[in-house]
Amino acid sequence: MGSRVYEDASDWNRILLEVRAHLPMDQRVVFEIRRAGPSDAEAIAAAHLDSIRSIGPSYYEPAIVHDWGAHIEAGLYRRAMGRGEVFFVAVDRQHDVSSTVLGFSSHAQYANDHGVGVYVRGSAARCGVGSALLRAAEADAIASHASSLQIDASLAAVDFYTRHGFIETGRGSHLLPSGRSMACVFMTKALNAP
Ligand SMILES: CC(C)(COP(=O)(O)OP(=O)(O)OC[C@H]1O[C@@H](n2cnc3c(N)ncnc32)[C@H](O)[C@@H]1OP(=O)(O)O)[C@@H](O)C(=O)NCCC(=O)NCCS
């Protein structure tokens, strides 16, 4: 997936968002969505672990949360980028000095199937960050001529994906690298080209 595809989805090149304008000023989150590169891998790993450890315990037992995050390290994302998976990050722009990655999304193609995933730090949840990240990944999938998206959704994300038009196709489990299984919901979404 080269830069040409991404330029086609140029809305997501660098967009500054202030979301939930109806919220009090101290609850607003100002963030930028941009395409991630290998130099973002450490920050993506930190946000991924934070998301699992802060949001996951409300949906899974401790042993599953532990194993879910156990394999996470920066090389995972660098290798995925090398295979063509496209990542976007939401960067905190609330404070001039902060550049914390609040969350990330990705779009990967496996043969004719396209998958996306979204993870947001617990401290930034329910502020619209995940929705903006999902839209970026979806735009990239559409630019790659995907006609549908597939997700093995964690129980923590089913309501979120449902809100964004995904429908359940089945229930099962996802095998973690440790060998432990975590319950998940298989979901799909038909895409309409813009
Ligand atoms: C799923 C996730 C990415 C959502 O990110 P987010 O930034 O909180 O999502 P948004 O604020 O954009 O939510 C948009 C809408 O989705 C729905 N939604 C999101 N999280 C929800 C939750 N925990 N329970 C119910 N509905 C939820 C709501 O309708 C929400 O709108 P509202 O806040 O106005 O009610 C985040 O909860 C997360 O990182 N979870 C843990 C990691 C994970 O499981 N990722 C998916 C792997 S497949």
Image (tube, rainbow, N blue to C red):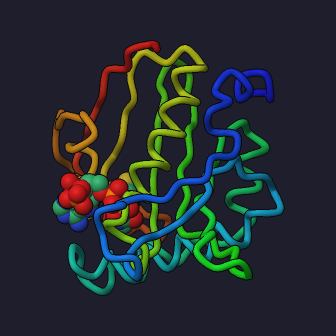
Residue 135 visible at all: yes
Image coords of residue 185 (percent x, y): 22, 48
Would residue 54 appear left or right of 178 to someone viewing this image?
left
Image point 17% across, 46% down: which residue?
Answer: 171
The quarter in which the N terminus is drawn is top right
| Figure quarter occupied by ligand 1 | bottom left
Q: Nearer the viewer, residue 7 or 153?
A: 7
Q: Is residue 4 above or below residue 31?
A: above
Q: Nearer the viewer, residue 59 or 179?
A: 59
Would residue 9 appear left or right of 24 to someone viewing this image?
right
Image point 19% across, 34% down: which residue?
Answer: 167
Q: Is residue 160 above or below residue 141?
A: below
Image point 56% across, 46% down: which residue?
Answer: 106
Q: Residue furthest bottom?
A: 62
Image point 43% across, 73% down: which residue?
Answer: 124
Image coords of residue 119 (percent x, y): 46, 61
Image coords of residue 184 (percent x, y): 25, 54
Residue 181 visible at all: no
Give residue 123's quadrant in the image: bottom left
Q: Nearer the viewer, residue 107 or 19?
A: 19
Would residue 128 appear left or right of 11 to someone viewing this image?
left
Give residue 125's quadrant in the image: bottom left
